[in-house]
Every structure is written in structure tokens, then in C-alpha cells.
Amino acid sequence: MSRALRLLVVAGALMAGPSAVAAAQDAPGPADTLGLGAFLERVRASHPAARQAELARRQALADLRAARGGFDPSVSASWDYKRFKGIGYYDELDLRLTVPTPWGVDVKVGWERAAGAIINPERATPTNGLLSAGLSIPVGPRLLADERRTSLRQAELAAETAEAEATNALLRLLQQAARDWGAWYEAEARARIAEEGVGLARFRLDAVRSRVREGDAAPIDSVEAAAEWERRLLAAIEARASVASARLQVSGYLWDGAGAPVPLREVRPGAAPASTALPTMDAPALDRLARGHPSVQSARARWLQAEAQRRLVLTQVLPSPSAEVSALAAGSSLGALPSPADLSDDAKLSANVRVPLFLRRELGRLRAAEDRARALAVERDKVARDVRLAAERAAVEAQAVEDQLTGQTHVLAASEALLAAEQRRFEAGESSLLIVNLRERTVLDERQRLAQLQARRATALGSLAVALGTPQLLTGETAGAPRR
């Protein structure tokens, strides 16, 4: 056997080595890689979309704080004074403290003093002032709902909606980032496999040319080897272009803490995502998912907001009476106020009622509020159903990818064994260079299919994380159970 032929056999043996896909797809050391988990952590921490979602959540919390301010106690004061041509007409001072409560009842405490030569008799007070303390009580439907309590409830639900929408936005961002990282991983793997194929084809071409020069092979064999080398060289050029495009796509996700874009260094995507224990999609798990998924929580919060608005509008259709009762005492000591049994002598009472007559505006608003609440209830049920179906589909797809990866590993091992056998037949003169090239091309194709499936695992995990509402499934913080 000539030296060139022996080298050719050695090259074939290298191609048929155990776990050749690992040799073709191993990335550089950890310092030169950007794995999926680390990449997604950087995206979640610094990407503008993630920061916008966090800002929206904080804005909703600020609105909730403002709505709670509607129940803050308030103090008011007024002072009126008039003096003309040496005559003190009046000197009136009025101080009020109002303490709202979550039940629609306001606690009111006041102190007033009026003095002067000419004052309104109903404003007259004892010399040391008049103290009052009492309650303002809505009677009827406004005891159950009013603008202030409705605003607070809607702000609380808006905060829940913002939290859920922020989680959804983060999930969609991480899903797309995982998909693009997978495309980058696949492009890099294909490029390495293509470059290895080019190197082997070039090595074989040189060996065949040497055999032709020595008279051990026909000249047509060198044509076959040259054509195979050119074919693989074109595939490598296309693979390098795909790598450049994928790197640019991935670099768009990288930002620093100051909000400035960060270029992707000369790194590779690192190891493929490891196999993950997939959650069981049984009936209890799906029921928990239908209650706890961010999309369901958001739809439910919007429906509850509409229900709160409907109850408020309903109170405007019905008569809305209210009453105010206050105990009175001279001076400024709360201890001087009479007991509830003695209010008949020292008290101030008032009542008012509002009754709409034609009800056209109120009934129109009520009908609109009811229809909106019904529409959002339908949307809530639809979202819950869609979430269940999406979770089942994503779990089936993720499991299918895992099964395909197992099968593809076996296919690749079989292809490598066939290539090794074909190399031995070629060494014995029982095969041709064309068949060896075909076997080798099959091995390269199977490696690329394996890389494609490994990239699809990242995409499948992203889809499953969105379906389950758990970004931790992508970042590896939990085992991937549905969030309660």
C-alpha cells in the first residue's frame, strides 16, 4: 500500500472515531464561551425590553400608592377676618380633620371660633370655640361601593396586571433570545462541521493526486476528489455567512447596566442545552397552570376591574342618600363631647339624597359596563383554555425533540460505523472513492442534523417556558414546575 493510501485510511479512521459529533462541536474553554443560561441571564438583567417591563410594573405600583392616598387623613383650615373704620366685623377660624375609612365612612373632627361685632348668628360660637366630632355615613348602595374604593381596587388589579404583563414580556423576550441563541449555536456547529469536511476533503484530494502521480489510481479519481472538495468549500462559505448573521442577531440582545449596547466578543455559544426533566401535564398540573399563568392572571385582573366599575355604575342608578352626625361641645377638649345618649341637645345632623329621574345616562353607562365585564369574562375563559392547550403542545414538542435527539445519536453512530467499514473496504480494494465520499458526506449531514436538534432543544425550552409561565425553566433556577 502506498504512503498516500495509508494516510487516506488514517483520515477515514479519524472521521469514524467515537462520538465524532463532540469533536466537531466542542467549543473553546469556558472563558471563550457564552452558554444559554449565562446569555439569558444577561438578557434578563440588561435588555431594554426587560427594563421597560420592570418600569411598567413600578409605574403601576406608583399608581397604586396614589390610589391608597385617597384614604389618607387630611387637615383643612380657613380664616376670615374683616375690620373697617375701627369696627371688627368678624374674625372666624375653622379647622377640620377628616379621616376616611375603607368602609366608606369618614370620621370628622372640627373646631371653629367666630367673634366680632357683626357675624352671622348661625356662625356664632362660644368664646373658647366650638368642638365637633362625628361621622359621615353613606346610606344605601354607596355603602358598598364608591369612587374612592373603586379606584383603589382598580389600582390594585392594575398592579397585578402589570406584574403579569411584565412576566409575559420577559418570557417572550427570553423565548426569542433562546431561539436566536439556538440558531447561533447551530450556525457555529454547522460551520465547524463544514470546515472539518473541507479539511478532510482537501487531505483526501492531496492523497489521491499523490496516488495518481505514482500510478496507483486513475486520473478520474482526482476529479472526483476535487469536485467533493469544491462542494464542501462552497458549503463552508455559506456556513460562515450564517455564523456572521447569527452573531449579529445575538449581539442585539447584549446591553450593559447603563443601557449601552455591548458587542459580542470573539466567543462561541458553548455547550448545547442539557436534557431537562419535563413537567407532567396531568389534570391537576393543568388546573394549577390555568390559575397561575401570567396571561390568565392578567385576563382575570382586567375582568375584575370591569366588575368593580360595573358595581360602581350600578350605585349611580339607585338613589344615593347619605347622612352626617356630629357631637358638639364648647372648648377644644374631646372629653367635653356628650355621649351618644345625650346627642339630642348638643349635636348637628344633616342628610341628603340624589335621585336621577330619567336614568338615561346612568342606564347607558350600566349597560356598557355590563357588556364590557361579560366580554372580559369570555376573554378570561378563552385565555385559560389557550394556556392549557399551549402547555400541552409545548410539552409534546419538547418531548419529541428529546426523543429525536436520542434517535439521532444512534443514527450518527451507525453512520460513523458504516464509514469506518467503507474505509476498510476501500483499503482492501473492494470500494471506490465515490462511495467513501458519500459515506463521509452522510456522517457530516448527520452531525449537522444533530446540531440542528440541539438548537431546537433551546427553542423548545423557550416555548415551554412561555406556555408554563416560568422564565426559570430557561435560566435554570427551578426544575421547571408550573408556578403556583
Image (cartoon, grey):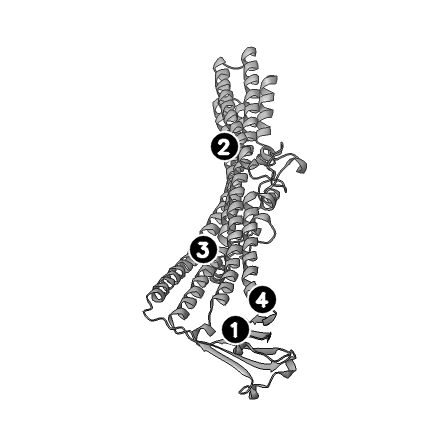
Q: Which mark is residue 163?
A: none
Quick one: 5 or 130, which is closer to the camera?
A: 130
Which sits earlier in the primary sequence, circle 3 or circle 2?
Answer: 3
- For the point 55% across and 86% down, which residue is it? 343
Mark closer to the observer (2, 1): 1
Q: What is the spatial separation of the Cα atoms under label 2 and label 1, in whole angstroms?
A: 72 Å
Quick one: 422 or 316, which is closer to the camera?
A: 316
Residue 253 occupies which quadrant of the picture?
top right
Q: Amino acid at mark 4?
A: Asp
Q: Amino acid at mark 1?
A: Trp
Residue 474 shows in the view: yes
Q: Which mark is residue 445?
A: 2
Which sits earlier in the primary sequence, circle 3 or circle 1?
Answer: 1
Which sits earlier in the primary sequence, circle 4 or circle 2?
Answer: 4
| On-image quarter of the C terminus | bottom right
Q: Which mark is residue 387?
A: 3
Q: Which mark is residue 72?
A: 4
- For the point 52% across and 62% down, which residue is it? 156
The x and y percentages for residue 454 are 53, 41
Q: What is the spatial separation of the Cα atoms under label 3 and label 2, in whole angstroms?
A: 37 Å
Q: Secondary structure at mark 1?
A: loop
The x and y percentages for residue 99 are 58, 71
- For the point 54% across and 65% down, which residue is it? 70
Which sits earlier in the primary sequence, circle 4 or circle 3?
Answer: 4
Q: Amino acid at mark 2?
A: Asp
Residue that carries the numbered disc 1 in the rendered image: 103
In the figure, 253 relative to 204: above or below?
below
Q: Amino acid at mark 3?
A: Val
Mark closer to the observer (4, 1): 4
